[in-house]
Image (cartoon, rainbow, N blue to C red):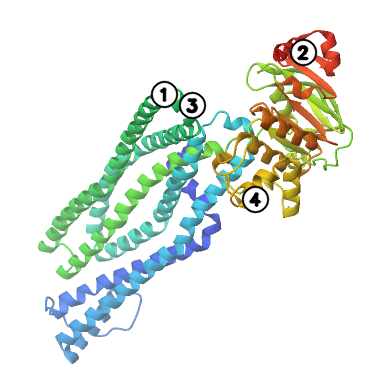
Amino acid sequence: MAEKKNRFPFIMLLKRFVGPYKGAVALNILCNLLSTIFSLFSFALLIPILEILFKTSNNVYEYMPFSWDMSVIKNNAYCWVSNYISQEGAMKTLMLMSVLLVVMTLFKTGVAYMASYFIIPMRTGLIRDIRNLLYDKIVDLHIGFFQKQKKGDIMSRMMSDVGEVEASIMSSIELLSKNPIMIIVYLSIMFILSWKLTLFVLIVLPVAGFIMGRVGRSLKKKSKEGQTQLGQLLSQIEETLSGLRVVKAFNAEKAVIRNFRNMNERQRSTVNKVNRRYMLAHPMSEFLGTTAIAIVLYFGGTLILNDNSSLTAAEFIYYLVVFYSIINPAKDLSKAMYSIEKGTASLERIDVILAANNPLKVVDNPTPVKPFEKEIVYKDVWFKYDEEWVLKNINLTVKAGKTVALVGQSGSGKSTMVDLLPRFYDVNRGEITIDGVNVKEMTTYDLRSLMGNVNQEAILFNDTIFNNITFGVEDATEEQVIEAAKIANAHDFIMATENGYQTNIGDKGGRLSGGQRQRISIARAILKNPSILILDEATSALDTESESLVQEALERLMRTRTTIVIAHRLSTVKDADEICVMKDGEIVERGSHAELIEKDGLYKKLYTMQSL
């Protein structure tokens, strides 16, 4: 199967994405067929004009009973034109033929436009559908996937690569509908006019096709390389914008500029090679087409001059016109193949995301979520990201309504431990249960609906304050939002902004201070009203005044809720019901603040160091 996909990538593209647009494709094919037929009829008017109107033929024609025999149809057409000339004269016949030519061309161009008209919604729909698929997949994938990917590269796949795939799919449709229809119809007429000459043409054309195909095959590799480099470029831009403060603080402007320019130049060089080969398609096909016409002109002319052909001079001219009409579809066919090669390379990059496996499996019959009442239990939990164990044999019970704090040095496994509870990752060994139900037996939606998070870095969106507070909560009223903001000590500063709750806070909440961003984040958690609260270093990045306001808001939020707190500042967790001290992925001490001080172990050492 893999080999077939490589040989016929357009079949794969159409099967995957074109299903919802079968009607549009059928109308497009019908219109292309009609356009080709009208084109042939308009060309056919040249023969009677040349042979009869300008007296290149002295034959006398008599009407024959109609049949689908080509010679009968041709005879009757000539008969009608001859009679019209004899009755109305040459001038009126010329005018009539000219009007018919215009009418047939109008029909031809009209249905050609309708072919494009019907296919346009498909073009835009394909881009929408593929981006929707990608975005849905990105939102659904587990967090671990994105730790190995660059954001800029993912953005490149959603924008640039999707455009390439859309162009490739449209080329695939032309490859299977418009161009083959035209080529088949034109070749049929050519066989009817002269089978000898057409057989000769079929020997000449594959040679030209082979030469053009050699160029197309080199496009896929370079195109994929160019798209990868574009992703790296976007990643560099995203990282620079995110870390601009650090860049300036360390006087690293020249270094990042030099790095960006080198990457930009490499991408430009690759794109130059791709575009030069792509642009070679038109002039190469035109040159080879003209060469083929010259050869056919010589060969056909030789047949006529030697009386070895049934073709008349006028029919030979018509034959050349039809043959020349094959050149454009053949050129489009070659360009379509180039486009398909480029699109296939982009599709491979998109499929890295679409085909990514989400290890967070959902059981066939998930347990319905119930209000949290009893306890959270970590039982013999082991976890690792790659090779090294990050958590080892964790056993912990968090009773409903209690506060448990996780403390310890950086890298001891605190954040990983709380990430396992909402199933951002799954444990490798052991289990985590909520009221006796394994978290793996719940849907992630139901599981996470029990929880609210307040992180060290308040994650806000480029939107209004109101929409940031109501994020993830549907149908929240203004009164509920205001009440949540008041509990979070946020209402006063919100009302001091230019548009109150409708003020836009900028990218990542950049128009607010750190303490303000954190209080908006707390208001969001309050509005959600979760049973289980996870606080991950929620005050560690704040100044003393902001920390005081945020701590007060957190204490209000924690009332009557089950809370797991990660803290570096041990003074903020002195009142926790249980404090777990972690080291190298294990819980090495546990107890209340007083009990741990009395043990005179690692906790007391850390607490004493912070007090000093």
Q: Residue at x 39, y 42 (%)?
A: 341
Q: What type is the residue that disc 3 sits on?
A: Val
In the rendered image, the quadrant that contains the C terminus is top right
Viewer can see residue 310: no
Q: Do labels 2 and 3 touch, CB within 8 Å?
A: no
Q: Nearer the viewer, residue 596 or 472?
A: 596
Viewer can see residue 36: yes
- Looking at marks 1 and 2 on the same chain, the residue that comes earlier in the sequence is marked by 1
Locate residue 235, reporting x and y percent.
47, 33
Return the residue at label 1.
251
Q: CA distance from mark 3 to mark 1?
A: 8 Å
Q: What type is the residue that disc 4 sits on?
A: Tyr
Residue 603's disc is 2
Q: Residue at x 38, y 24 (%)?
A: 255
Locate residue 14, reporting x and y percent.
49, 51
Q: CA distance from mark 2 to mark 3?
A: 34 Å
Return the residue at label 3.
246
Q: CA distance from mark 4 to mark 2?
A: 43 Å
In front: label 4 or label 3: 4
Q: Residue at x 28, y 41 (%)?
A: 276
Q: Residues within 10 Å of mark 1 (few under 14, many from 20)?
A: few
SS class, disc 1 = loop
Vertical arrangement, residue 307 with respect to residue 126, above or below: below
Return the residue at label 4.
501
Q: CA distance from mark 1 to mark 2?
A: 40 Å
